Amino acid sequence: AKSLGRGKVQFFNDTMRQKLKGAALLESDIQSGMNKHEFALFYQPIFTIQTGEIIGFEALVRWHHPERGFISPADFIPLAEETGQILALDLHILELAAKQLRLWHGTLPKDFKVTVNVSSKHFSTLEFADFIQRLYFEYKLPLGSLCIEITESGLIENLSLATEIIEKLKTCGVKLCLDDFGTGYSALGYLHQLPIHILKIDKSFIDNLNCGENHPLVDAILTLASALEFDVVAEGIETQTQLDVLKQTKCQYGQGFLVAKPMPAKQAFTFLTTGKLS
Ligand code: C2E
Ligand code: CA
Ligand code: CA
Ligand code: CA
């Protein structure tokens, strides 16, 4: 038991050292990556379930690291959350999205939205709303063209401040989407208090829509959303069966590899205007 114990300690030490080494490199790299424009946004279409019409894009960050190559957000967003750099990185990414919206100015369908993921850490200071207002002004964005996605966890901690911030964002027509809904800790009691507009049903629920069976959880989320007058986006639709099942429900919007993967801006725009992958 003693040697096993020691082996265990050894194992943790090695992993921790490796993790720290990686972290140290990436941490300084995130800042230089922003300076050197190594972050780019890919865009994934969000469509109307019943008609297939594309009504927006979700912006998803990609990092082209000079030495490490392509790094997935799943590998650096959690690190950035840990170090607090997520605050600067999110603002950098929001600015990339605003720039792109400006480039697309006048060519997008009416009420088209680009939705950007941000950490709920921003909802503990009013600066975030000021920043968004500045973006709208500086890039002359149409009202409502930018949408914000957050996961629920951080919002409940300071409900009144979060509400104040969201109300401030509303002056730019910014809509708020609660991401990954149904995973993690859901305090249903606060849902109706938050000025939120959209719920995104997590992919794990959509994965289970593959057979002719009942889907009580998805039904329950849709009923809840409709009672609170939220729109609903189903994420991670991969099969025709999943889409067919959703067509029988009141779920308004969808997103997933079945229709399109996240793509560079140019390709996403081609897909939007021609319906074809280039
Ligand atoms: P998320 O916000 O839940 O984003 C959805 C993820 O699912 C994306 O992965 C997307 O590429 C992927 N996805 C979309 N449709 C399908 C599908 O049909 N099947 C499968 N298997 N996957 C699908 P991605 O781009 O790797 O992003 C992972 C996570 O990293 C995101 O999860 C989000 O939490 C975070 N993230 C990505 N971009 C940003 C960003 O710009 N800022 C912040 N703060 N977080 C970001
Ligand atoms: Ca998201
Ligand atoms: Ca999600
Ligand atoms: Ca998810």
Image (tube, helix red, strand yellow):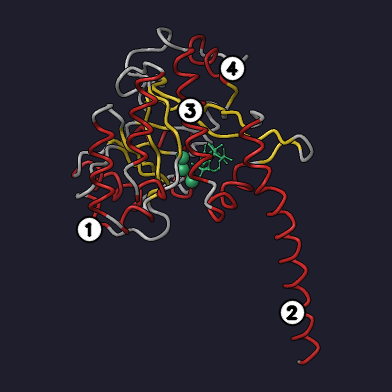
Instruction: From the top left corner, tell me how far across and down residue 16 is, in percent.
Output: 71, 66
Could you give the CA–CA distance between mark 1 and mark 2, rounded to whole angstroms? 43 Å
Image position of 53 with respect to 59: above or below:
above
Residue marked by disc 2: 9
* Closer to the eye: label 4 or 2: 2
Instruction: Decide if ligand 3 comes within 8 Å of the CB at mark 1.
Output: no
- Residue type, label 1: Gly
From this view, report whether residue 86 is shown above or below residue 274. below
User: Closer to the N terminus: mark 3 or mark 4?
Assistant: 3
* Above or below, comparing residue 43 to residue 178 in the picture: above
So how many labels did they put on this image?
4
Q: Amino acid at mark 4?
A: Gln
Residue closer to the observer: 188 or 75: 75
Q: Earlier in the sequence, mark 1 or mark 2?
A: 2
Q: Residue at x 49, y 36 (%)?
A: 237
- Mark 2 CB in 8 Å range of ligand 1? no
Please tell me whether mark 3 or mark 4 is closer to you in this view: 3
For the residue carrying disc 2, how many other residues have a C-alpha within 10 Å: few (<14), some (14-19), or many (20+)? few
Would you say 55 lies left or right of 211 here? left
Identity, as a three-letter code, of the amino acid under mark 3: Glu
Q: Secondary structure at mark 3?
A: helix
> Helix or strand or loop: what does disc 1 sit on?
helix
Where does label 1 land, which residue?
189
Residue depth check, mark 3 versus mark 1: number of the one nearer the observer: 3
Residue 268, compared with residue 274, is above or below; it is: below
Q: Residue 267 — which label? A: 4
Q: What element does badge 4 sit on?
A: helix
Identify which residue, 252 or 40, lies in the foreground: 40
**Secondary element type, mark 2:** helix
Residue 99 in the image, given as x and y percentages of width and height: 49, 20
